[in-house]
Image (cartoon, rainbow, N blue to C red):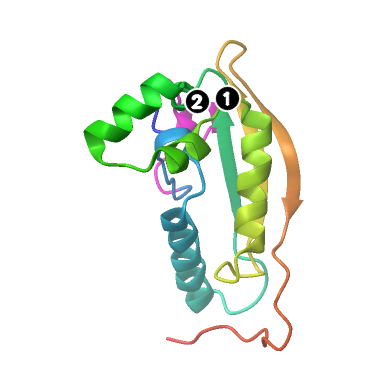
Amino acid sequence: TCLDPRIDPAAFLGIGLGDAAVVRNAGGRVTEAVVDDVAFIGFLAATMLPEGPLFEVAVIHHTGCGTGFLADPGFRSAYAAQVGANEEGLAAQAVTDPEATVRADVARLLASPKVSPRITVAGYVYDLDAGLVRRIVAPAQPEQPEGVGASSPRP
């Protein structure tokens, strides 16, 4: 989910300390680093749970996200110049339509060969004004690539 301080996944999901691993970044976007984190957590969990499903990844974007400013060419250009970033890459990170971006990010996780087919991925949007979470993408599992065995890693 997003690093926005108005967004507290523990509060709106009703989870406590130790109930979930939470990865937060600007916009809650699924970057390559997030894919790697999910792959690592999945590999670690598979070493402890050699059979059955592992866990669900809930990709959560929200309304009124500050990354929406990256859609403005002037803001994006000034920010890119300050941090030495690629403007096109920054534009792709903007969350102006959280339903569309959450769909794209769920698809990215599901398409990654790094993500275990024993992990379920779903997409949600948190409405800041209403204080409600709405499911946008139903839970699904990545397809296992052809020729890849279903064996679990062993420590």
Q: Which residue is mark 2?
A: 71
Task: Name the side, left or right, on which 112 lies relative to 85.
Answer: right
Distance of label 2 from label 1 (alpha carbons) = 8 Å
Q: Position of residue 26 (x, y in %)?
A: 41, 35
Q: Is residue 49 above or below residue 94?
A: below
**Residue drawn at 54 percent across, 29 percent down:** 95
Question: In the rendering, at what x and y percent does residue 98 appear?
Answer: 62, 29
Mark 2 secondary-structure assignment: helix
User: Circle 2: is it few (<14), some (14-19), or many (20+) Cα within 10 Å?
Assistant: some
Q: Which residues are magenta?
A: 5-18
Q: Indicate the secondary structure of the residue bearing disc 1.
A: loop
Q: Amino acid at mark 1?
A: Thr
Query: Residue at 23% across / 32% down in the picture?
Result: 82
- Counting from the top left corner in percent of width and height, residue 68 is at 49, 23
- Relative placement, left or right, of 43 versus 103 is left
Left-right relation of 102 to 30? right
- Residue 153 seen in the figure: yes
The image quadrant of residue 34 is bottom left
